[in-house]
Amino acid sequence: MKISQRVHCRSCVRFVFAALVFPVCVISISAADQTVVLKAARMFDGKSKSLISNGVVVVRGDKIVDVGSNVAIPSDAKVIDLGDVTLSPGFMDAHTHLTLDYTGNFNEKRLKEFQTNVSEMTLMAIPYARATLEAGFTTVRDLGSRFAGSPEFVDVALRNAINHGITPGPHMLVATKGIGATGGHFDSTGGYRDKLFGREPEPSDGIADGPDEIRKAVRFEVKNGANVIKAAVSGGVLSLADEVDTPQFTPAEMAALVDESHRLRKKVAVHCHGDQAAREAIEAGVDSIEHGSFMKPETLQLMKTKGTYLVPTLMATEWIMSKIDSYPPALQAKARAAGAARSEMFRNAVKMGIKIALGTDAGVFPHGDNAKEFALMVGLGMQPIDALRSGTSNDADLLGIGQAVGTLEKGKRADIVAMPGDPTADITATERVSFVMKDGKIIRNGLATPRTAAVQDDDVDLPAD
Ligand SMILES: [Zn+2]
C-alpha cells in the first residue's frame, strides 16, 4: 500500500512538473495542426531594400512555411486578413534592462532599490516584459541586471519563466550582472561611504580587476546562465563616481574579456561612451559598442574595418535630456556632454556605413516605448528601410540568431508583427504595432493590454535630434 501510494505520488509530481515546465511545447504541438495565413497590403521581409505589396505569410506551428507576394493559400488554413498594414519580422532590441526601472526621480529610485526586496523587484519585471512584447519586440538582448548587495540572477529567472510559458514576454538573451572595474560604471558601491555595503564587490558581483579576475567573472556569469557577456569599458552617465568618457579597463583586460567570452562562444557587448576606450575595445575584438557617444571618425573607421556593430541607444539620452532636472547635478553634466556628442557620432556612423543594430537602453525610459528609437535614428539621417533592418535582421545577426529569426523566410520562427500604413513613409508607424505573433502564437490582434501603473509612459515629446 505504501509502495503504490509512493508510485502514485511520483506520477503526480512528474505530471505537475511537466505541466509547469513544458506548457509552451504543449501549445506548439496543438497549434502545429492549424495553418494560419497572415495577409496584408504590404510586407517588409527584414532584409530587402523595399517593401513588397500583397504580403502573405503562411505559418504552421511555430514556423513560417511559406512567404511572399500572393503565395498559394492552403485550403485548410485559417486566413487572417490584416488589411492596410505592413507585416514585418518581430522587432528586436539589442539593449534592454527588463528587470530594472530607472525612470522618474533618480535619487528616489536609488533609495527605493535599497528598500525593496529583490523578489518583489522580480515580480515588478513581469509587466515590463509584457509591455515590451506587446509593443512588437519579440526578442531582446537584456544587458545587465544587478541589485546592490544581492546575488540573485533576476534576468535569468525572467528569461526562463518566459520560455516556460509562465509569463508573457519576448525571447531574452541575458547578460546577468555585467562586468566592470572597481569604481567604474558597474560598481554600485561607488559614490557611497567606503564599507557602507560591508565589503568591496568581487568578480561574482561583476567587479573585476586584472585579466585573471575578468576571466573568472566571465566564467562565473556563463556558469549562472549568461547568453552574452556585457562589460563597461568606459564611464557612464547614470553612475555617481566615474567620469563619463574615461577608459576603465586596460587593453590587456579587454583582451582577456574578449578571449574568455569567445572561447565560451559568447558574444561581448561593451558599454562605452569614450573614444579611447572604444578604440581599445574594438581592437580587442568586441562584438558591439553600446552608446559610443564620443567616438571620432577614425574610431568609426576602425569599427568598419573590424565589422564591429554600433548599438546607439538614442532613446536613453533623449529620455534623460527630457527629464534632466530630476538627475543629480554630476549626472546632469555627464548627460549633457554625452547628449551633445552622440548626434554627430551617429550621423557619421550612418554616412560611413557602420553596421548599426537597434538598441534602446529600455529601463532608462519606460518599457514598451522601445519603438521610438526608429524615429530617432531616421531623424539623424538613417533611411527608414535601414532603420527597419537595424531592428530586425541586423539585430539577429549581432545576437548570433540570424539562422532562426530576423527575416520573414521559410523555416524561420514565426515571430511577426504588423503596423498601420507604410513605415517607410512614416517611421512612427513602428510605434503603433497592431498585431504581434511570437512562436506562431498570436499575442495581440488589435489593442494592447492597458499598461499598469508600473509601466507608465509620461508621453514625453521626443525631438528628432
Ligand atoms: Zn544599458
Image (cartoon, rainbow, N blue to C red):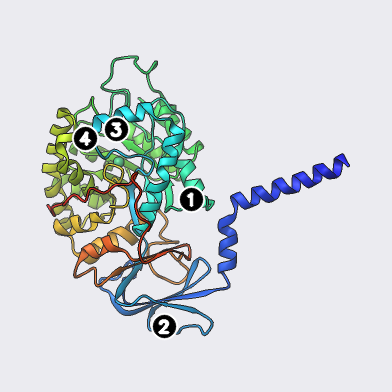
Kindly check if marks 3 and 1 are in contact, taking CB atoms under 8 A apart as contact.
Answer: no
**Could you tell me how far apart the alpha carbons at marks 4 and 1 are, in whole angstroms?**
32 Å
Q: On the image, numbered disc 1 is attached to which residue?
A: 167
The vertical placement of 319 against 67, above or below, is above
Instruction: Tell me the amino acid under the disc marked 3.
Output: Lys
Q: On the image, numbered disc 4 is attached to which residue?
A: 237
Kindly check if marks 3 and 2 are in contact, taking CB atoms under 8 A apart as contact.
Answer: no
Q: On the image, numbered disc 3 is attached to which residue?
A: 109
**Could you tell me how far apart the alpha carbons at marks 3 and 2 are, in whole angstroms?**
52 Å
Where residue 322 sits: x, y (%)? 15, 44
Q: How many marks?
A: 4
Where residue 267 sits: x, y (%)? 39, 45
The vertical placement of 461 against 118, above or below, is below
**Is disc 1 surrounded by few (<14), some (14 to 19) or many (20+) residues within 10 Å?**
some
Q: Secondary structure at mark 4?
A: loop
Nearest the eye: 222 or 391? 391
**Is disc 3 surrounded by few (<14), some (14 to 19) or many (20+) residues within 10 Å?**
some
Where residue 243 sits: x, y (%)? 19, 29
**Could you tell me how far apart the alpha carbons at marks 2 and 1 are, in whole angstroms?**
35 Å
**In percent of the image, x 79 and y 47: which residue is there?**
8
Kindly check if marks 4 and 1 are in contact, taking CB atoms under 8 A apart as contact.
Answer: no
**Could you tell me how far apart the alpha carbons at marks 3 and 1 are, in whole angstroms?**
25 Å
Nearest the eye: 139 or 158? 158
First in sequence: mark 3 or mark 2?
2
Instruction: Tell me the amino acid under the disc marked 1.
Output: Thr
**In percent of the image, x 20 and y 31: which residue is there?**
246
